Image: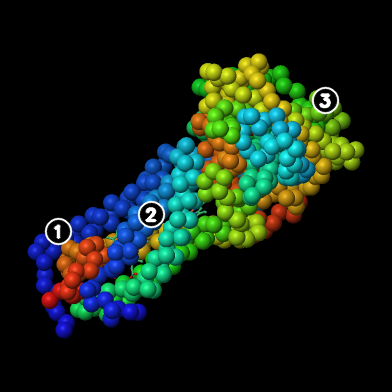
Amino acid sequence: MTRKLSKPPYLFLRLGSIAVALIIMATAFAYVSGWLDPQRLTPDRIINTFEANAGIHEGYRRNHAKGICVSGEFVSNGNATGLSRASVFERGRRVPVVGRLAVPGPNPVIADGKPLVRSFALRFSLPGGEEWRTAMNAMPVFSVSTPQAFYEKLEASKPDPETGKPDPRKIAAFFAAHPETQAFRDWAKTAQRSSSYANLAYNSLNAFRFIDASGNVQVVRWGLVPEAPFTPIRDAQLKNPDFLYSELQARLEQGPLRWHLVVTVAGPGDPTDDATKQWPDSRRKVDSGTLTIKRMQDQEHGACRDINYDPLILPEGIEGSDDPLLSARSATYSESFNRRAREQAEQPPSSASTDDAHDDSQETQS
Amino acid sequence: MRNSMHHQAGFSLIARVLHWLMALMVITMLFVGAGMVATVSERHAWLLQLHKPLGITILLLVIVRIGVRWAHGTPPLPSDLPLWQRLAAKLSHLALYALMLAMPLIGWTMESAGGYPVILFDGVTLPALVEASPGLYSTLRFMHTWLAYTLFLIVQLHLAAALFHVLVRRDSVMPSMSTGPLPGAKRSKG
Ligand code: HEM
Ligand code: HEM
Ligand code: HEM
């Protein structure tokens, strides 16, 4: 029954072509994985740069590391149903929300008085397992419009090993090379820090697409507008590096906090792919409902800890726009989440104590 | 197995269609997965949107395919094939089936454990298989990567073996998966 294998002609050529097929496939895989292309901007590279700049704070977010978990609900007034068919906007719809108030920068124990920007992230839990996640900043425009520029800014803010602070010349050189940062810098020059998380307006900055019941698309940005009036930071507050926490606690003891979720509709010609450009003030604004925050928890134990506020987790009726920051954020937040989830599993951070060792390098971070 | 029923020595039409369709899908998935986590460009978002429904389709198809295999059996390997090659063939096919089943299940469970809604396409969200848990998430996330690499390696070996049958042994293994059963054909050469 057994038969000697007859040797085919050109045996080496035949074996060689098998090898070539395997090498081509393996090379293609390595290329796609970025292993042959060290210049490619990957989520790994961005997160590694955050870590190189600030060290690894195990279990914490690689950016916006210091924050507070909050929870409450959103009640829709139905005004935005004409813009988006997302169930969250149905008139009278109430959805539970888990949020996170935070300050930018990779340092989980930075003094609250230092960062200029603050942020609010929300997860709306919609019926049927759908979710809407959004991470907003309290600023009118973002500093950069592309992931590449974000990365270059991060590189430029690397602390100098001598001084422990970013090299101001490198930052200046970055800004000089990136005129799109001008609107942000103008704002940063005059912006005042507020006394609270509760009296700030937070903006999506990136544009999104709203799809209505008949499939019409509108490009929008959204934001939270506070009911509490803005008051500037007080000198006494600066003595407490965690004043945002105690201030929020004091407010919540008085009662819930409210914001209005306001949707701004792009006009013809408004840039949809550039978060450094504001849209004219005259654009149509729709107040879609009220966010009520009732409770807070520290971020080491709160429900927001294990949430990745990926801005591309959207319900039916809302889609991402052509803004290149969105995809980059989604990819990078995931890598940050992967690392902190792993650290979390290995060794949950108990509680952070504030140190002042870190300087004000985070001042203009976002 | 019910090999004895298959003197015509080839995979059934349905088995062949499933094999080539799924081969294309699995290889696509490996490249889509590897590519989407290695870029911050817009490709990330749309590859991820492709990754999940395609992965779940593989899960559904592999269940059908295992049923088909159970019902139809497989043609015998060439009788002159050395024992170690038979074993390698059996083991690698078993591993391929196991991974085609495990990879999407891990993906789905991992997304649930990460607290993510498992969105297949607009308006279609799969139920969470487990409660959110960072510990479980990171274990599964690790497995998803390393089992994907393992799958890639086995697919490479599988491809090498298939080409070896075509180019060097020139036996009936490839025809059994390509043209399929030929009336009266015998699986082994000679
Ligand atoms: C390419 C540009 C950007 C990169 C690479 C980036 C990077 C990051 C990273 C790594 C995190 C931590 C994520 C986590 O572990 O959960 C984060 C958090 C955050 N980012 Fe960005 N970001 C970018 C653009 C933006 C923009 C345009 C906004 C403005 C709305 C923004 C707002 C936020 C907020 C609010 C958080 C905190 C979310 C939370 O509290 O969990 N980011 N960012
Ligand atoms: C790359 C091109 C591929 C070629 C040329 C190829 C070729 C073949 C051939 C000739 C067979 C028949 C083996 C026999 O007679 O026992 C086979 C079987 C098989 N192939 Fe592939 N294949 C390819 C890709 C894949 C991929 C990507 C997968 C899945 C991950 C796969 C999974 C299988 C399985 C599970 C079997 C065993 C079928 C059974 O015994 O039920 N193949 N393949
Ligand atoms: C045959 C099935 C599948 C294959 C071969 C596959 C393969 C891969 C690969 C190669 C990666 C990149 C891993 C890395 O480099 O770290 C990946 C990532 C991923 N896969 Fe899959 N996958 C499959 C099914 C699924 C399914 C069904 C889901 C979810 C429903 C899923 C969700 C994901 C997610 C979310 C990531 C990226 C996570 C992150 O951003 O860190 N996969 N997959």
Q: Residue B112 at x, y = what percent?
A: 60, 56
* Other-residue count near label 3 (Cα within 10 Å), few / some / many at <14 / 14–19 / ≥20: few
**Residue drawn where x is 60% and y is 50% of the image:** B117
Tell me the subunit letter for badge 3: A
In the figure, is residue A170 to the left or right of A362? left
Mark 2 vs mark 3: tell me if same chain: no
Q: Which residue is mark 3?
A: A229
Q: CA distance from mark 3 to mark 1?
A: 79 Å
Front disc: 2 or 3? 2
Q: Which residue is mark 2?
A: B25
The three-letter amino acid code for the residue at tag 1 is Leu
The three-letter amino acid code for the residue at tag 2 is Met
**Residue drawn where x is 79% and y is 47% of the image:** A297
**Relative to A221, residue B110 above or below:** below
**Residue drawn where x is 64% and y is 18% of the image:** A283
Q: Is residue A123 visible?
A: yes
* Other-residue count near label 1 (Cα within 10 Å), few / some / many at <14 / 14–19 / ≥20: few
On-image quarter of the N terminus of chain A = bottom left
Q: CA distance from mark 2 to mark 1?
A: 30 Å
Residue A68 picture quarter: top right
Q: Which residue is mark 1?
A: A13
In the figure, is residue B79 to the left or right of A304? left
On-image quarter of the C terminus of chain A = top right
The three-letter amino acid code for the residue at tag 3 is Pro
Checking the image for residue B136, the label placed there is: none
Q: Is label 2's Cβ within 8 Å of ligand 3?
A: yes
**Residue drawn where x is 26% and y is 65% of the image:** B177
Mark 2 vs mark 1: tell me if same chain: no
